[in-house]
Image (cartoon, rainbow, N blue to C red):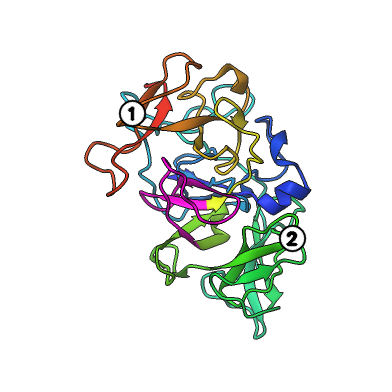
């Protein structure tokens, strides 16, 4: 499975600066919160599951779901190698997963087992930019899915004006306003989402379980402000997550988290995208491509637009989704 980690766009704007990712190990999970959780095949070094989502949120380890978002190649993109973040032998699969400091789990975001007047919410207990822990926090408002909200302590502070079972997401760094997102219900093994056109995304080692909208990576049709379309860590499609790139990570630049690349790119294993500017980093931003009109950058040499899905396995609407990689 693949581990994906999300980082908070809000925290990124205030703290480490979205443009400063040089691919080296970070003290915080670049994808919103460093967590090891089964997630999409976007950014995040892992043995198959995680976030990476540097989906502007958090990062924690969570093994909740198996992803099949591996592109078809002659090699085995799911074979892990010896891990060494300072060499090209990243130890990650086609999509990498990032290790992050473990946090503390004080409550269950699924069962909401806090006392009356409190809610279980994800936050960063290490002062970083990625969600890695859960805690019981006072309910400060009654915002439901889609409602406007604020987070007084920032995107990873664990306090907001959303109701129980909701979290303030995609917070604007200037206005401090975001949108309430409903948390998944059920369990990690059988997650459910009530809001229409959403899917349960479990990342950052399971401390984040959000009902997020689907999207098309070829057109990047996310409707929210400051969002990017990345592979769904829990399924076969793509989902909208926070954009932590700061528009500073185009193709061929180092990455560490699933949501740290510019829109239209995915954080890839260096074996599949060996750009010279990414050597020594955990991953490298590589572009998605349209199989009906395949186009890939000239560098690194040997790139080819390869199917994201195995033959006959693409969900409806994703048949032309490809990824620029060096076939293995």
**Mark 2 residue crowding within 10 angstroms, few (<14) / some (14–19) / many (20+):** few
Circle 1 residue: 293
Q: Is the residue 190 above or below the residue 268 in the image?
A: below
The kind of secondary structure element at disc 2 is loop
Q: CA distance from mark 2 to mark 1?
A: 40 Å
Quarter of the image containing the N terminus? top left
Query: Residue furthest toward the top?
Result: 301
Quarter of the image containing the C terminus? top left
Nearer to me, 287 or 273: 287
Circle 2 residue: 175
Q: Is residue 34 visible?
A: no
Query: Residue furthest toward the left?
Result: 312
Q: Is residue 45 visible?
A: yes
Inspect the magenta stretch and tell me whether residue 233 lies in it: yes
Residue 305, image quadrant: top left
Nearer to me, 293 or 145: 293
The region drawn magenta spans: 211-240
**Mark 1 residue crowding within 10 angstroms, few (<14) / some (14–19) / many (20+):** few
Q: Is the residue 1 above or below the residue 190 in the image?
A: above
Q: Position of residue 148 (x, y in %)?
A: 63, 70
Secondary structure mostly seen in magenta is loop
Q: Position of residue 181 (x, y in %)?
A: 55, 67
Inspect the magenta stretch and tell me whether residue 12 lies in it: no
What count of labels does the image hold? 2
In percent of the image, x 35 and y 26: which residue is there?
Answer: 294
Q: Position of residue 90 (x, y in %)?
A: 55, 28
- CB contact under 8 Å: marks 2 and 1: no
């Amino acid at each position: 499975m693949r581990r994906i980690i999300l980082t908070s766009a809000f925290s990124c704007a205030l703290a480490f600066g979205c443009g400063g990712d040089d691919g080296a190990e970070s003290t915080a999970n670049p994808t919103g919160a460093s967590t090891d959780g089964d997630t999409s095949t976007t950014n995040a070094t892992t043995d198959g599951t995680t976030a990476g989502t540097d989906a502007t949120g958090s990062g924690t380890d969570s093994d909740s779901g198996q992803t099949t978002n591996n592109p078809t190649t002659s090699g085995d993109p799911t074979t892990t190698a010896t891990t060494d973040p300072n060499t090209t032998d990243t130890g990650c699969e086609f999509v990498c997963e990032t290790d992050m400091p473990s946090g503390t789990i004080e409550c269950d975001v699924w069962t909401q087992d806090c006392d009356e007047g409190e809610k279980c919410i994800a936050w960063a207990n290490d002062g970083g930019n990625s969600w890695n822990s859960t805690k019981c926090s006072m309910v400060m408002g009654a915002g439901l899915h889609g409602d406007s909200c604020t987070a007084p302590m920032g995107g990873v502070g664990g306090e907001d004006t959303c109701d129980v079972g909701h979290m303030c997401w995609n917070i604007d760094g200037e206005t401090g306003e975001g949108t309430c997102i409903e948390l998944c219900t059920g369990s990690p093994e059988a997650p459910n989402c009530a809001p229409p056109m959403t899917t349960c995304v479990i990342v950052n080692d399971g401390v984040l379980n959000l009902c997020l909208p689907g999207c098309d990576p070829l057109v990047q049709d996310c409707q929210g402000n400051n969002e990017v379309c990345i592979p769904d860590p829990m399924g076969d499609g793509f989902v909208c997550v926070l954009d932590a790139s700061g528009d500073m990570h185009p193709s061929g630049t180092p990455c560490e988290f699933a949501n740290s690349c510019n829109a239209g790119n995915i954080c890839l294993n260096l074996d599949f995208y060996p750009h010279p500017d990414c050597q020594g980093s955990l991953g490298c931003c590589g572009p998605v491509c349209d199989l009906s009109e395949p186009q890939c950058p000239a560098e690194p040499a040997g790139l080819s637009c390869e199917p994201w899905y195995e033959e006959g396995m693409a969900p409806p609407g994703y048949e032309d989704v490809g990824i620029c990689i060096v076939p293995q």
